[in-house]
Amino acid sequence: MTSLNVSFEFFPPKTIEASFRLWDTVQTLAPLAPRFVSVTYGAGGTTRQLTREAVAAIAGSTDLSVAAHLTCVDATKEDTLSLAKSWSDLGVKDIVALRGDPPKGTEGFAPHPEGFANSCEMIEALAASGDFNICVGAYPHKHPEAASLKDDVDWLKRKIDAGASEAITQFFFEADDFFRFRDLCDKAGITAPITPGILPIENWAGTKAFAQSCGAQIPDWMDAVFQTALRDDRSDFLSVALSTELCSDLIDGGVENFHFYTLNKPELTRDICAAIGVTPQTVLQKVA
C-alpha cells in the first residue's frame, strides 16, 4: 500500500478552555506523525496575536513541524514581514500564505495603504527572504470572488510562480471535483503538489453555512443523509464513513497527502486516519 502523509490544521484558542482543547487536539493527533500542523489566522487578521502565541506554544513544546498562517489583510508590509521574521526566529520554516478574508462588516478586500496589494506580492516578499517554504490555498470550486474556475487556476499559477511550493485545497465532498481541478492545474502548467483539504463534518448546519460563505459545493444528497443521521444520533459515524470513502477514492486516484481541517476536535480526524491506514507512529515529544 502507498505510504500516506497527513497534516492537520488547528485554530488559535480564545479562552482558557479552548486552550486546553487545542492541547488535547495536539496530543491526540501528534502520534500520527503529521508532515506539519498549521495554525489559522482569523478574518481581518483578528487572531494575529493569538496565532503567534499558538504557533510559539506548539513549536516550543513539541517536535512537530509547525506552519503558521499569514495574511495581508489590514497590515503594513513591515508588520507582515516582521511577524514572519518572529516565526522564523522560533524555528518555524513553513508558512501558509493567504490573502485573507476581509474584516466582518466590510464589502470586500481592500489593501492596507502600506500593505501588500494581494497574496502574490506577499509570497514574492516571503520567498525573497529565503526563510520559508510557502504553501498557498487552492479552490476546486470557484472562489466567490473569482470570475471563473479558470481564473482561479490562473491565479494559483501566479502564486506558484511567485515562490510557493505547494497548494492546499479548500474542502470538498466528492473526489471527482478534486480530479477535475487537478486536471485543469496540469493543463495550466502547475507542477507543484496540490494537497486535498478534508473537512470531517462535526456540525452539519455549521458546515453548510461555511460552505456557502467560501463557495464550496455540497452535493444535494448529503443534506438528506445527514438529517437522517442526526435524527438517529449517528452523525459522527456518518461523518467518518463519508470522509473515509472520499479519502479512499482520492487514494485510488493517486493522492498520497491529505490535509485535515480539525476544528480543534480531533476524534473524527483520528478515526478517519485510522480507517485509511494512518496509525500512531510516535508519542508527543517535549522539546528540552
Image: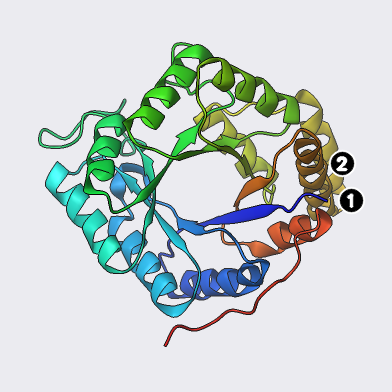
Q: Position of residue 121 (x, y in %)?
A: 24, 32
Q: Give the SS element for disc 1.
A: loop
Q: Which residue is mark 2?
A: 228
Q: Quick check: 132 left or right of 154?
A: left
256 up-or-down from 16: above or below:
above
- Can you see residue 70? yes
Q: Quick check: 177 left or right of 140?
A: right
Q: Position of residue 161 (x, y in %)?
A: 36, 28
Q: In whole angstroms, how far apart are the C-alphas of marks 2 and 1?
A: 6 Å
Q: Give the SS element for disc 2.
A: helix
Q: Which disc number belongs to residue 49?
A: none
Depth check: give the residue in front, 50 or 130. Answer: 130
Q: Which residue is mark 1?
A: 232
Which quadrant would residue 228 be assigned to in this image?
Answer: top right
Depth check: give the residue in front, 270 or 189. Answer: 189
Q: Position of residue 133 (x, y in %)?
A: 39, 49
Depth check: give the residue in front, 217 or 52. Answer: 52
